[in-house]
Amino acid sequence: MTEFLRFLEMGGYAGYVWSAYGISAVVLIITLLLPLLENKYIRKRIDRMLEEEQD
Amino acid sequence: MYIWFHKLGSAPTFYKWSGLWLPWLGAICFILFAAGLYSGLVYAPADYQQGDSFRIIYMHVPAAWMSMFVYVVMAVSGAIGIIWHVKLAQIAMISSAPIGFSFTVLALVTGSIWGRPMWGTWWEWGDARLMSEALLLFLYIGVIGLSIAIEDKRKAAQAVAILSLVGLINIPIIHYSVVWLNTLHQGPTVSKFDTPSIDMRMFMPLLIMALAFKLFYVVVLLLRTRNELLWRERRSQWVKNIIQGTSND
């Protein structure tokens, strides 16, 4: 346990190291999620377009 | 060879193949990130001068490398796109910009957080490396803005390609800014392979993270390119088949 706490402390630089890694994780996840969400949106739009053509 | 190239360049074939590759590339990318994070945060020893704060390097340096790499890919595919009218290259150019933007933001933000304890400042206006990287951010914003603002896809591709080719001159400036101009940012530690100034246990995590970032770019680029293809070819039969589920791609 103390070993894990020491790891979290990052030799006194915890605030800097973890905020850098935290922000990086958030930015990378957003970068990955955007095209995945866009894909769903595009499929829905094309699907609607095809349905309208059939009417 | 040409036929093969042409076939891969055709939209339905590209869509099909990239769909087969994506889960594997994503899985390898995830494993590399896990390995890179573990070795960077736990396995690598603390730096004798910077202590544990140096661990920011494993996010900062790969992001900074990729911010430049993606820019070069974007400019080169832009040139291919307008010279030979390769549609897939034009799409790759437009799709690269938001990814490069993310990497540039990361390089600047993590650099700033690292600079605070090491240099005593979040930002230094006089530093050549910092300013040229900030200019890169604005080039990406310009490219994204242009591609959204110009309605005609062909004209947008031309304008974006020209802007990114002009901005290409910034890349060697970023790279050599720490060598030519001796300002705040430190010099290269990694590219001097003959006399390595970095411990192997510190270098391996960096290499793994660099690979993870590169693969991450490939994965997101494929996802974005596939979206763009679906939308641009929405009137064609192959897209119809995919959307209506008669094709299981």
Image (cartoon, coloured by chain):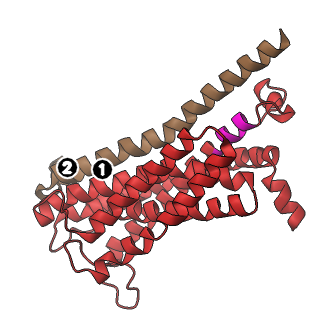
Query: Which residue is nearer to you in this view: B22 or B76?
Result: B76
Question: Can I make out residue B23 in this image?
Answer: no
Task: Report in which chain the residue with disc 1 lies.
Answer: A
Along the line of sight, the residue nearer the viewer: B36 or A21: A21
- Residue B89 numbered tag: none
Chain represented in red? B
Q: Nearer the viewer, residue B206 or B169?
A: B169
Residue in the picture at 36% in, 41% down: A26
Write down which chain is painted brown.
A
Marker count (numbered): 2
Disc 2 versus disc 1: nearer the observer: 1
- Residue visible at 61% across and 27% down in the picture: A40
Q: Give yes or no for residue B228 being in the magenta stretch.
A: yes
| Quadrant assignment for the C terminus of chain B | top right
Q: What's the amino acid at mark 1? A: Tyr
Amino acid type, residue under disc 2 in the picture: Leu
Crowding around mark 1 (Cα neighbors within 10 Å: few <14, some 14 to 19, many 20+) is: some
Magenta part of the protein: which range?
A: B225-232
Farthest residue in the right direction? Answer: B3
Label 2 belongs to which residue?
A8
Percent across and percent down for residue B206 are 39, 67
In the rendered view, tell whether residue B194 sits above or below residue B228.
below
Residue holding disc 1: A21
Q: Is residue B181 above or below residue B46?
A: below
Query: Can residue B77 be seen at all in this image of the molecule?
Result: yes
